[in-house]
Image: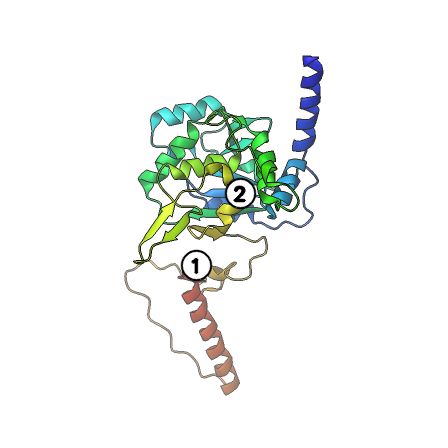
Amino acid sequence: MNIFKQKISQWVMNWLTRDGPLPQTPLCDFNRLRFELRPCDVLLVEGRSHLSSVIQLITQSPWSHSALYLGRLFDIRDPRLRVCIEANFEGDPEEQLLLEAELGKGTVVTPLSVYKNEHLRICRPEGLSADDAQKVLGYAIRKLGNDYDLRQVLDLARFFFPWAILPRRWRSSLFQHNAGDATRTVCSTLLAEAFTQVDFPILPFIDRGEDGSLRLFKRNPKLFAPRDFDYSPYFSIIKYPFLGMNDVGLYRRLPWDKENDFLDEQPPPRTQPSPVPALQEDENHARENYIHRAIHFAGLGRKEL
């Protein structure tokens, strides 16, 4: 009987985690995104599995999965944590790594390259100090090996259904079932717990007193879904579309001298320009204006663009 239950459970798990077809049109420029990632960024994934579809349905969001970007092995300061990662990942030390909780695998270290063909988004905790970032990473790394809590996903579904559909007494046993069990988690809960360790807000409850004072209350980490990192005002959203419309290749239009290499501290003297007709002067003037704009925009940060 136990063997039969195990086979049924395995079949259900395989069905839930089986990915659908890849999108025909890429939405994300993976090469630019991987260059931009910083340790402690939250990476959102628009999954393609049956479980992803369930999470997208109950949260009314395209984001079904969240992972914590660790960086490369040498980005982890604490040598004990590096040893822990090495025990859970046998790949190239130069590989960019994520930490995530997945059904059927538990809390694991995954190469970023696994999501090369997926629709991704970076959520960056604004103002998080370098020391606190290491604490967030350390908390998450110490959870490696924990099981995935599918029961929590089902309980979360009850929170998102209106009471008119489900009676209030059925709303959830999320805080009663396995209360205090630290050996099971889901992706967004793990990340919420990690940021809570350093009091970094995600979606806190805010109470304003009559005197204008403010108090923040932490939400239970089990109530978080991947979409909350996208929605949080304390995380910056960074997107790299596959076809960018603003600054792609702008540096290629800078007025480089293709004939000479400059070897001195002073620029070479300009040659006297020959007279040009009035129409050509207008054309040159328009070209110079375009070049100045290109130089200006090239010096701006992405947010200013």
* Quarter of the image where the C terminus is located: bottom left
Query: Which is more toward the observer, 208 or 193?
Result: 208
Residue type at mark 2 is: Pro
Residue 33 image point, x, y percent: 51, 47
Residue 23 image point, x, y percent: 67, 46
The residue pinned by badge 2 equals: 226
Residue 266 image point, x, y percent: 28, 64
Whether residue 77 sits left or right of residue 225 in the image: it is: left
Q: Residue at x 40, y 42 (%)?
A: 218
Query: Which is more toward the observer, 165 or 112?
Result: 165
- Check the image and report above or below for 217 versus 274: above
Residue lying at the far bottom in this picture: please name it: 278
Q: Is residue 286 visible?
A: yes
Residue type at mark 1 is: Lys
Query: Which is more toward the observer, 31 or 282?
Result: 31
* Separation (CA) of disc 1 from disc 2: 24 Å
How many residues crowd mark 2 within 10 Å: few (<14), some (14–19), many (20+)? many
* Quarter of the image where the N terminus is located: top right
Image disc number at residue 92: none
Q: Residue at x 59, y 37 (%)?
A: 169
Q: Is residue 255 visible?
A: no
Would you identify the image quadrant in which residue 265 lies? Answer: bottom left
Residue lying at the far left in this picture: please name it: 265
The residue pinned by badge 1 equals: 303
Mark 1: secondary structure: loop
